[in-house]
Image (tube, rainbow, N blue to C red):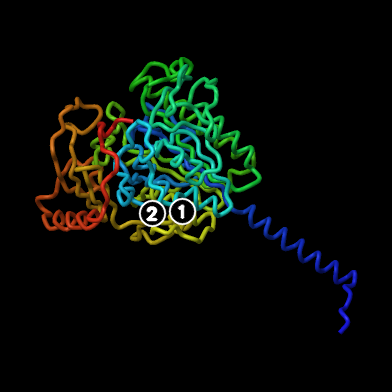
Amino acid sequence: MRRRRPTPLRLFAWLASLTAAWFLNAARAGERPNVVVIISDDCGYNEFSLHGSETFSTPRIDSIAREGVLFTEGYTSGTVCSPTRAGLLTGRYQNRFGHEFNIPPVYSESNGLPLTETTLADVMREGGYRTIALGKWHLGYAPTFHPLSRGFTDYHGFLQGARSYFPLDEPTVLNRLLRDREPIPETFDYMTDELGRAAVDYIVDAKDTPFFMYLAFNATHGPNHATEADLEAVGEGPGNQTHRAMTHALDRAVGMVLDALELQGLADNTLVFFINDNGGVRGHDNTPLTGFKGSTWEGGMRVPFAVRWPAKIPAGQVFTKPVISLDIFPTAMAAAEIETPPSEPLDGVNLLPWLTTPTAPPDTRPHQTLYWKNGSRWAVRDGDLKLVVSAREQGGRPRRQQSETPERAAGLFHIPNDPAEQHDISAEHADDVARLTRMYEAWKKDFPETPWAPNRRADAP
């Protein structure tokens, strides 16, 4: 049988169909949102005008909430730096894989985010995204734990949990500034600005492909370093001037990122999260919350948390139901239309159904129950009730004199009515105390031990 030769018309139709399909796929690829996760470090709850602070001005950070959603009951899964990061990047309670405490600041071939865990960067990279990490890592120091070994295609930052904001004459293997795996000269002026500028460079370079950016500022974690220009900009006044200057720089760097997205035409289709990594450290302003970093009182893990995605999420929302940092993983995955889940089930939930449909029934919530565990300090929130067992700082608020000797304490609180956890209702609700205790015991019964000993204070780097 003779094969028919393609006529010019048929050849044109075939080429046209291929071209149309290519352009359709390209258009669909172009519609995939970029995802940017911005993390601040150790800031006090009341150190953002986002929450109405008149002492700290953070207009660029505030704009994320104004142009999207402010979570009034936003939590992290950990009460200190490294565990929270492990939970955020895996979407799972870090206690499930033994990452309950901060990694000690010594080089180790075994201490780090377990290699058995799948990271958000792994999933996004597999889904065709460029994956960029900047800033503080704090999830392991050996090459096997390096960001480029955990799903990221690019890295600009330092591995340790804290370092100087100014250039170091003799940086160590843990705190030196790296570009990918190689140390680079410390010619920057101030670390917060350096990370903001590096983020801008990556945005410009990656503008033509979907990217996931994990931008982990060390601001305002100690040491308390501020530039003379920022100290002068905030001036003398109420509150700690150095903290205000450091926060001023943080807000400026966040603004650099937002401006770069706008200038590259990416702002509308970029999902931006902003979150603090845990409650404010002692000495910062956590008003009106009880407790500080390391505790399981609200002041230990209730944090500033906001998100925007102008193309999909209506602006000006205030979301009053509990959400947690674990939700960032499945929300980003859903936004990117990545359907293949990690091998282990996620504890976070996709928030988009609530955020893109503000008319969702008011009695629905992403989470009925949330848990926290940091050694012998623990808490369970079920609905509006929270049971907490913790080393409670006497006085409980940063504006009062604090005792360095904590006292054991426990209590049951109705959080929407009592966010400061001042009115213990456990005596009137003994059945709820017993019920929440049983829930906590069932939740933690199979958790492995943390491989590294918690040999430092809970609020150490």
Local secondary structure at mark 2 = loop
Furthest-left residue in this view = 427
Three-letter amino acid code at the position of disc 2: Gly
Amino acid on which disc 1 is placed: Thr
* Left or right of residue 373: residue 183: right
Residue at position x 15%, y 54% in the image: 433
Displayed quadrant of residue 367? bottom left
Rounded to the nearest whole Å, what is the CA distance between mark 2 and mark 1? 8 Å
Q: Residue at x 33, y 48 (%)?
A: 94
x and y, in percent, of residue 248 in the image? 45, 26
Q: Quadrant of the N terminus?
A: bottom right
Image height of 296 relative to 433, above or below: above
Going by the image, does 252 lie left or right of 23?
Answer: left
Secondary structure of the residue carrying tag 1 is helix
Badge 2 or badge 1: first in the primary sequence: 1
Which residue is tagged 2?
Answer: 348
The mark found on residue 111 in the picture is none
Judge by depth and name the residue closer to the eye, 438 or 454.
Answer: 454
Verify CB contact (< 8 Å) between mark 2 and mark 1.
Answer: yes
119 versus 461 height, above or below = below
Residue for badge 1:
331
Residue 304 appears at what percent x and percent y? 38, 39
Residue 134 in picture, x, y percent from top left? 50, 36
241 over 60 or under it: above or below: above
Q: Position of residue 339 (x, y in %)?
A: 51, 61
Camera-nearest residue between 2 and 372: 2
Q: Say which quadrant the C terminus sits in.
A: top left
* Position above or below: 309 against 161: below
> Which picture quadrant has residue 392?
top left
Neighbour class for label 2 at 10 Å: few (<14), some, many (≥20)?
Answer: many
